[in-house]
Every structure is written in C-alpha cells, then in structure tokens.
Image (tube, rainbow, N blue to C red):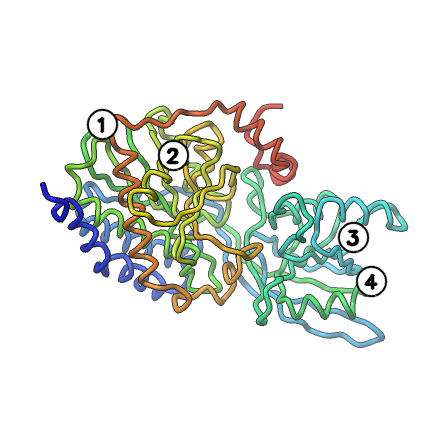
Amino acid sequence: MSRTERTAWIGDVYTSDVGWTHLEGLVDIGNRMAGSEGERRGAELTRDALAEAGARNARLDPFEIQGWTRGGSQLVASADGTAVDLRCIALPRSPGERVSGELVDLGYGLPEEFEGANAGADDGTLEGKIVLVRSDVPDYAERYVHRREKYYHAVEAGAAGFVYRNHVPGQLPPTGSVGTDEDPIGEIPAVGVSSEVGARLARRFDGEEVELAVDAVIGDAESQNVRAELGPETDERVLVTSHVDAHDVAEGAMDNGAGTAMVVELANALATREEDLETRVEFVVYGAEEVGLVGSSRHAERTDRGTIEAIVNNDGVVANRTLAFYTHGFDDLEAAVSAVADRYDHPAETNPNLSPHSDHWPYVQWGVPGYHVASTSDEVGRGWGHTEADTIDKLEKRDLREQAIFLTDLVVHLAHEDVSVERRSPDEIRADLEAQDLAEGMKITGDWPYDE
C-alpha cells in the first residue's frame, strides 16, 4: 500500500462535515439539561448519527436520576433602608427555599478563607450568613478549588445560602450543580451572579442583609447513555466517550456538544479504518454528567473494569486549536500521545496530574487508564462555559477536523494488540490525590471513593 493510500483517510476527515453537522443539531435542540426532553432528543440524535456513521448496535441505555427543573430565583440586597433586586440564576439541584442573612464576602472561597472567617466572626462561625465567593482561584493558590467544594465549605460552616460570583466579565451569571451522590439535592439554596453583580455585592452590601430565594421542581426523572461499537468482537475494549447533557442556560456548544460531535466524527473516521482496529472500540456518550457524573458512574458500576484497555474522554475539545491530555500518571498514555504527535509533527500538550471532574473519573479512580481530552487554555476556570455565552459561534470547524485526525490515530494506536497501557492500583491513585491536595475537596463534596 502506498503512503497516499495509507493517509487517504486524513483528507476524508479534514473535509468531513459529519461532526460539525451533529454539533449544529445538538445546539439547535435548546435545553439539554439532565433528565429533560431535550437531553433525550440529543441522545437519540447521537444514537442515530453513530449508526449512520457505521457503528454497530447503536442504542440507548436509560436510567433513573434525581430530576431538577429550574423555576425562578431572586436575590435582594438591602442597605440604608433601600432594597435592590439583583439578577441571579439558581445553581442546579439547589433546594427550593427562601433564606435571609448577613452577606459575607469570602473572596475566592479558598479553604483557608473559610477557616479565617470562622475564626474571625463574633460568634466564631458563619452560621446563618449568606456566603459570596468567586468562581476562580488566585495565582498563588496551590490548586484549583471546584465550585462544589466551595459550596460544601459553606454548608459545613453553617451558612444559610451560597452566592457564586463569576470572574468572567460580560453580565454572565454562572451555573453548575450542587448536591452529592448520596444526597443529590443540596443543603442550602445557591445562586450564580455575574462578575458585575458580584462586584456590586462585595462593594456595597458586604455585611448587610440579603434575601435569597430559589424555586425549583424536584422529582424523579430519566436520563440515558448512548452506546455503539466498531472493530472486532474482543472482550477488551477502548472506550471513546463524551457527555450529551448541558446546562439549560445556553446551547452547551463547548460543554459538551463539541465532545459529542467529536465522538460522532471519530466513529465516522474509524468506520473507514475498521480493519486497522485490533481491539473493540466502544463509543459511550453519557447522560447526566453535569449533575454528578451520573451516567458514567452507572456505566462504570456495570462494566468489568478489567476489560477496558484505555478511555479517551472528550470534554472540552475544540474550544482552542491545540489538544490537551490529562494522563493521570499513566506513562503509557503519555507515550501514546507523543507517538501520534511525533508521527504528524503536530502539537499536543500532556499533563500527568489527576483531573477528577469528568466522565473518565469513575474508572480512573480505580486505576483504569484514561485520558481527559480537552483544549489548551490560559484561563482559570471555565471561561464561557456554564454561562449563556457557551454558544457555537465561539468554535471553529477547522479545529474539530484537525483534532479528529489526531484522535482517530490515537484510538487506532491504543487498539493495537501490541500496545498495552500499564494499569495503576487504586492505592496509587489515592496517593496522588493526597499528594496533589485534591483529597480534601473530594472528601467534603462526598466524592471520596476510598475506605478510610
């Protein structure tokens, strides 16, 4: 076979509209919140696209979840006898409650800031207060502190309510779920406010009375995973994954329509290279990721982890041109990226640290080799993500195509019989979580999976 014949698939991928067309279909659905009709429509659209691409046995795998539907929310701040109604949105899985109390600005909401506020308060606690925190962390912080960790520090401190202030300007209140696996509905009402509203709260109303109210419909709901396969019928498999749900305030183009579009594009490309696959490739597009990795956790509980050779989880791709791979300390995963990057003289970044906040994690926490594949970024936090600005106009078709070429060859590489990725023990993953200062946050949010 000539070099031209061996690389003809690259031209097919670079001129393909399959993934981008799927992305447009997803964002045009509108609300794809976990458990919604829109999420189901997105799953059905993805199932059909995988089948059309040539994947076998494309199907939906439904499961029950804790449903939460947004109602109204209100934030009223008072000072000098004047009450001001400020724009806010509820954080998903916030309880439907109305509370009031003194506003306390805790800056970035780092663990030490909560400790300092507790020590410095007249009564020694934040009991009954409304806590305001930013969505980013400062340059001097040793690690990123997730929204849910900040929320549960507030809960643990006895706060009555939680206000999450975006650090990205543009009148964009952020969303993002609260709650735990055992208790899906959070303990105190929580809202997001824009950078501008947050600045006003911190400047004018710190120490003043605030009233916070959330209205939500809470009940049983159904989500679903999408599954399909390519390649030989081996017991072992390489998982190619993403999540189809998105927050209801925006199109969910970056988070994570682009990841699901990438899975469809990869299925389309791999169908033409199926003879190159020596291990089964399973495509799994999860539901209910945004409310606690529910779909992937369900799949992980019902899957023989020993049969999974590697996971390629797409969450945050296409947002920038260069791919970034969290390799979770698996040296063989880093070597595989380097091999593909060298083959095409194409840039890619790897990060050996742990990334415990997407659908690879229910497997990686037990030592299953897995990537979190995203895009490089100089920003702290999500940028446009989790706001109404997460729209398709910020993405480029060129980036989807280029990244699909890289990832197609990476999946083929991982599916070779002579390529093996050495597993890590759960104890090694646990030790890394401790060493990387991630354990504290996971314990307070109820995400710590290991016996003490």
Note whether residue 222 is visible.
no
Disc with the residue nearer the chain's start (2 vs 4):
4
Which residue corresponds to the image point at 18% horizontal and 55% vertical from the top-left?
12
Disc with the residue nearer the chain's start (3 vs 4):
3
Depth order, front residue of 285/370: 370
Indicate the quadrant containing the N terminus: top left, top right, bottom left or bottom right.
top left
Instruction: Tell me the residue that label 3 is attached to.
Output: 128
Disc with the residue nearer the chain's start (4 vs 1):
4
Whole-number angstrom distance, CA of label 2 to CA of label 1:
24 Å
Q: Which numbered circle lies on residue 207?
A: 4
Indicate the quadrant containing the C terminus: top left, top right, bottom left or bottom right.
top right
> Of the residues shown, which amino acid type is indicated by label 2?
Ala
* Callout 4 touching callout 1 (CB < 8 Å): no
Closest to the camera, between mark 4 and mark 1, is: 1
**36 relative position to 434: left or right:** left
Instruction: Tell me the residue that label 1 is attached to.
Output: 234
> Of the residues shown, which amino acid type is indicated by label 1?
Thr
Instruction: Tell me the residue that label 2 is attached to.
Output: 335
Disc with the residue nearer the chain's start (2 vs 1):
1
Number of numbered labels in the structure image: 4
Q: Which element carries disc 3, helix, strand or loop?
A: loop
Q: Position of residue 190 (x, y in %)?
A: 64, 56
